[in-house]
Image (cartoon, rainbow, N blue to C red):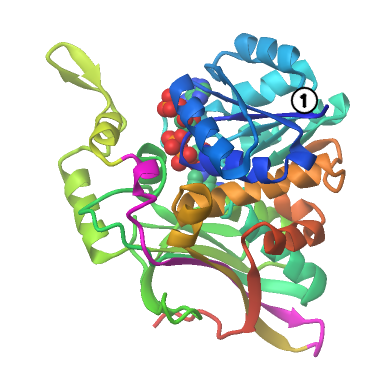
Amino acid sequence: MRKTLIVGAGGVGNVVAHKCAQDSETFGEIWLASRTKSRADAIAADVKTATGVELKTVELNADDVEATVALLRKIEPELMLNIALPYQDLPLMEACLQAGVHYLDTANYEPPETAKFEYSWQWAYQDRFKEAGLTAILGSGFDPGTTNVFCAWALKHLFDEITTVDIIDANAGDHGLPFATNFNPEINLREITQNGRYWEQGEWKETKPLEIGHDYPFPDSEVGTRRIYLLYHEELESLAKNLPGLQRIRFWMTFSQNYITHLKVLENVGLTSIDPVDYEGKPIIPIQFLKKLLPDPASLGPLTKGKTCIGCLITGTLKETGETGTRFIYNVCDHQECYAEVKSQAISYTAGAPAMIGGRQVLNGHWREPGVWNLEELDPDPFMEDLNRWGLPWQVIEAEPLELS
Ligand code: NDP
């Protein structure tokens, strides 16, 4: 029987485990490995109740390549879904190569000691995966992931050439708590407190963190008009490289004034820093201490109400008319519906369901080309069909380009 190994039993890992179990015909026997086995066991119990499928669980320190190779050789999975943290990407890719297992993740590598993420470290594995006849899929979440596929699908079906892309991510959900992050606080805050960056006419342009904001009218009436802020996000790097003719690409995310005020205070007092501080003779990393104080994102599931809306606003030469036009391709997801299905809020759901969908493409043979791939380099059609089938339906509408006032 085919086997699949999921690594990471956090908020997103919970969704991936549920979604894979919903399609156990494709994923076969499902294993869930994580640093803290009790968290994997708790997920397995929920998955059993929800789907009747029994997951096997095991403790694993994914930073330890030797231990991971030994586990892979024992289980012999066809595919590993890496849903741990970005710090584990390289050791897990290395282990997959040594044990002959296909690989997929949802976020690009980030060294623990530097708040910096980029694809170069993982792209460097291209030749080794090719030579081994193995496939590595990078960034199969929503953003990155589904947003990359939206661009590839738009280029295949709607546009002869794409000139600008604005990726826009709105969370219009409310958990009622004063301050919490929707996914791993350390990863989330490291991303938001960096300088903003976007790509235009072949050059990266830098802004101060959250310096550029804009009120954007989302197509879903419950999401409404919200303030979006320009951020650097990892899919900009691969899309700027892989979309021919592109002139500009930016990424935007909504934040409430309350969120920004909390973030400013935490930054001002030094709690978002990754530099160790000596506390009574012990080195403490402030952002890791802050993570301990903040609510576990997995606990937000039952509390969060409202919707997310994430999409790509794309301008280019339309195939249909040969004229310039703009389209918004997007998904709207309801926090409470997600919780009813998989006991997670929509942020974890929108990241986890595409990991399962990407995994389906590898296992079903649609995405089996040996090498290391970002999602826009692969055929978007089967992934787009699966989004509709597996819980993330999408729409395309005519839209106005995003002009800053
Ligand atoms: P969590 O912190 O909730 O979960 C991470 C899990 O990985 C935990 O179970 C943790 O174990 C486990 N883990 C951490 N280190 C190791 C290790 N060395 N060995 C084994 N297991 C380990 O994070 P999330 O679920 O919120 O995020 C998971 C991933 O999804 C991240 O990479 C994040 O960047 C990505 N993501 C991607 C999105 C997208 O759209 N592309 C959106 C949101 C998230 P323990 O329980 O012991 O802490």
Where residue 204 sits: x, y (%)?
A: 53, 56
Q: Please state if 17 lies on the left or on the right of 129 as rendered.
A: left
Residue lying at 68% horizontally and 67% vertically, measured from the top left: 246
Residue lying at 44% horizontally and 22% vertically, measured from the top left: 38
- Camera-nearest residue between 278 and 173: 173
- Give the magenta part as a residue range: 296-322
Q: Is residue 242 visible?
A: yes
Above or below — where is 333 with respect to 89? below
Q: Please state if 192 lies on the left or on the right of 236 as rendered.
A: left
Q: Find disc 1 in the rendering and name its residue.
A: 101
Name, please, the residue furthest toward the left. Answer: 280
Q: Please state if 314 lies on the left or on the right of 219 as rendered.
A: right
Location of the N terminus by quadrant is: top right
Q: Amino acid at mark 1?
A: Val
Tally of numbered tags: 1
Q: Is residue 166 visible?
A: no
- Camera-nearest residue between 227 and 218: 218
Where residue 345 sits: x, y (%)?
A: 44, 53
Residue 321 located within the stretch drawn in magenta: yes
Q: Identify the element where label 1 is drawn.
A: loop
Where residue 273 sits: x, y (%)?
A: 27, 35
Which of the 4 image quarters holds residue 173?
Answer: bottom left
Residue 228 located within the stretch drawn in magenta: no
Where residue 285 sits: x, y (%)?
A: 27, 26
